[in-house]
Image (cartoon, helix red, strand yellow):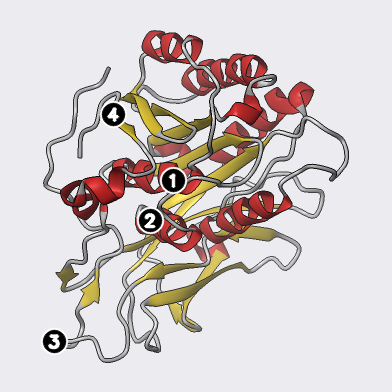
């Protein structure tokens, strides 16, 4: 779906049912489907561990150990990063500093990565606007950042849902970086809609929850907790910086992205339940190491019609024509 500089208001879903239908994750039956899992590994001191091999990992689908068919060190795979900036009214005071820090993040990401790394930029308040489709061109991204202004409302879940639709069409690794100061207030979509969309897109979520104050008074703890659950469920992690710590948070995200692994397996003999959501567990054989990876995927459920061995696609291929870079 292409929506360059396209705005969606709170009522847009009700007013445009055809557009909403296009957003819904499609379900496609295939004979065998590769499930991809992005993982990061840290030692007891919290330092990233990047030198592991396939034999160092184990992966379980609904408790059943699976054979790892594909193993990649992620520095070899291109990145598609959807950066979403909260421009609701409450961000007005900090927005200038957030924009400057995001710009430095773009520069660092492009400087250290490969030419196939791409960024798409979104802003969200009571509506969502995709400012730039995936590009490696810093100029248009910087111009879009300079034009951001804060105004009412926070449609966070709608923004995640729509960015997931774009990411689903991308090759390589898919990442969401969400810069916000609180929770959702105006979305048509709900928490579980947004999380399912991110899971279906194989997207790893990194929320950067900006902390303008040093205590809990007046802070949206519910929104922060919701984002933390999303990060943990997709294999990312949450950052809670104040304005002066934003650059450090983005530096940590880049380190994660440059020290990741991709594990792929073809589901076999996994126990089924009535829930399409399959629980995943990724382990490393060294008990001192800690692994972060998404906690599941959407696959076959008990009683699904079809021939034996069929699977529900985790990341269905879209035949829609991709929009051009801006």
Badge 1: how crowded within 10 Å, few (<14), some, or many (20+)?
many
Residue 51 is left or right of residue 272, and the answer is right
Q: CA distance from mark 2 to mark 3?
A: 26 Å
Q: Earlier in the sequence, mark 1 or mark 3?
A: 1
Q: Nearer the viewer, mark 4 or mark 2?
A: 4
Q: Residue at x 60, y 51 (%)?
A: 227
Badge 3: how crowded within 10 Å, few (<14), some, or many (20+)?
few
Q: Nearer the viewer, mark 2 or mark 3?
A: 2
Q: CA distance from mark 4 to mark 3?
A: 41 Å
| Local SS, label 1 | helix
Badge 4: how crowded within 10 Å, few (<14), some, or many (20+)?
few
Residue that carries the numbered disc 1 in the rendered image? 160
Q: CA distance from mark 1 to mark 4?
A: 15 Å
Q: Earlier in the sequence, mark 1 or mark 4?
A: 4
Residue that carries the numbered disc 4 in the rendered image? 6
CB under 8 Å between discs 4 and 3: no
Q: CA distance from mark 1 to mark 2?
A: 8 Å
Q: Residue at x 25, y 66 (%)?
A: 313
| Local SS, label 4 | loop
Q: Earlier in the sequence, mark 4 or mark 2?
A: 4
Q: Nearer the viewer, mark 1 or mark 3?
A: 1
Residue that carries the numbered disc 3 in the rendered image? 307
Q: Which mark is residue 197?
A: 2
Residue 253 is left or right of residue 146, and the answer is right
| Local SS, label 2 | helix
| Number of numbered discs on residues | 4
Answer whether residue 258 is visible to the viewer in this image.
no
Answer whether residue 125 is visible to the viewer in this image.
yes
């Amino acid at each position: 779906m292409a929506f360059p500089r396209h705005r969606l208001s709170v009522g847009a879903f009700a007013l445009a049912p055809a557009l909403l239908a296009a957003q819904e994750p499609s379900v496609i039956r295939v004979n065998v489907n590769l499930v991809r899992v992005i993982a990061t590994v840290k030692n007891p001191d919290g330092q990233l561990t990047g030198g592991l091999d396939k034999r160092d990992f184990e992966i379980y689908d609904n408790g059943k150990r699976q054979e790892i068919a594909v193993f990649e060190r992620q520095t070899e795979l291109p990145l598609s990063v959807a950066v979403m900036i909260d421009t609701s009214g409450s961000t007005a005071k900090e927005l200038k500093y957030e924009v400057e820090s995001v710009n430095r993040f773009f520069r660092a990401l492009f400087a250290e990565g490969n030419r196939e790394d791409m960024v798409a930029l979104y802003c969200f308040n009571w509506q969502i606007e995709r400012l730039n489709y995936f590009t490696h061109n810093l100029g248009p991204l910087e111009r879009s950042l300079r034009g951001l202004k804060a105004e009412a409302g926070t449609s966070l879940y709608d923004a995640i849902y729509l960015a997931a639709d774009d990411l689903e069409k991308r090759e390589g690794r898919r990442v969401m970086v969400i810069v916000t100061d609180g929770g959702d207030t105006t979305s048509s979509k709900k928490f579980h809609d947004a999380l399912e969309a991110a899971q279906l897109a194989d997207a790893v979520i990194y929320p950067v929850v900006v902390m303008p104050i040093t205590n809990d008074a007046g802070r949206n703890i519910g929104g922060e907790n919701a984002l933390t659950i999303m990060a943990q469920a997709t294999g990312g992690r949450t950052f809670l910086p104040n304005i002066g710590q934003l650059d450090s948070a983005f530096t940590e995200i880049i380190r994660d992205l440059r020290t990741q692994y991709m594990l792929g397996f073809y589901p076999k003999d996994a126990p089924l339940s009535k829930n399409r959501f399959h629980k995943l567990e990724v382990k490393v054989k060294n008990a001192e190491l800690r692994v972060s990876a998404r906690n599941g995927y959407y696959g076959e459920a008990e009683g699904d019609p079809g021939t034996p061995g069929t699977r529900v696609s985790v990341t269905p291929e879209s035949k829609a024509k991709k929009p051009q870079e801006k």
